[in-house]
Image: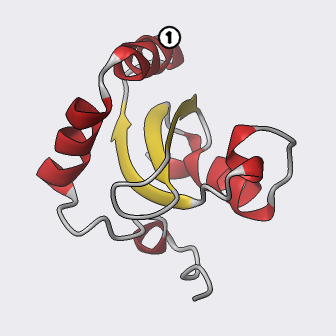
């Protein structure tokens, strides 16, 4: 099963311990490209939040949305801990999914 068509919940960050955005999608790579290009007006475009620092695969889209809502209710510190358990250096995980590194 390709990650591009799998239900996922994801967290983007502007920088290390910076502004976060949590979302859910069934097309992670496509959605990250949209965030990077600023394809839609909104929070991530306004605050230049483009670095994929966390994602997890869900069984269904409904499960991904439930998890997204759960994470969104958490305090910032809990979100940081979630990210750092799997990505302690806050690397851009989108590179591992085949996207080019973000510029500078």
Which quadrant holds the N terminus? top left
Query: Is 55 situated left or right of 77 in this image?
Result: right
Q: Give me the residue at 45% from left, 40% from top.
A: 10
Decide: few, some or many residues near mark 1? Use Cα within 10 Å; few <14, some 14-19, many ≥20.
few
Instruction: Identify which residue, 67 or 58, lies in the foreground.
Output: 67
Could you tell me residue 55's position as x and y percent? 38, 44
Q: Give me the residue at 40% from left, 71% from top.
A: 96
> What kind of element bears circle 1?
helix
Q: Which residue is mark 1?
A: 62
Question: To which quarter of the image does residue 66 belong?
Answer: top left
Could you tell me residue 57's position as x and y percent? 36, 36
Whether 23 is drawn above or below 39: the answer is: above
Query: Is 70 situated left or right of 64 in this image?
Result: left
Could you tell me residue 103's position as x and y percent? 62, 86
Whether 16 is drawn above or below 102: the answer is: above
Tell me, yes or no, if residue 96 can be seen here: yes
Q: Give me the residue at 57% from left, 41% from top.
A: 5
């Amino acid at each position: 099963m390709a990650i591009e068509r799998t239900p996922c919940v994801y967290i983007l960050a502007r920088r290390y311990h910076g502004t976060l955005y949590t979302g859910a999608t069934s097309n992670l790579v496509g959605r990250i490209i949209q965030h990077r290009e600023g394809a839609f007006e909104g929070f991530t475009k306004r605050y230049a939040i483009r670095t994929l620092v966390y994602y997890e695969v869900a069984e269904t889209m409904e499960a991904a949305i439930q998890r997204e809502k759960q994470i969104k209710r958490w305090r910032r510190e809990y979100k940081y801990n979630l990210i750092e358990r799997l990505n302690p250096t806050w690397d851009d995980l989108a590179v591992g999914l085949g996207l080019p590194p973000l510029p500078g």
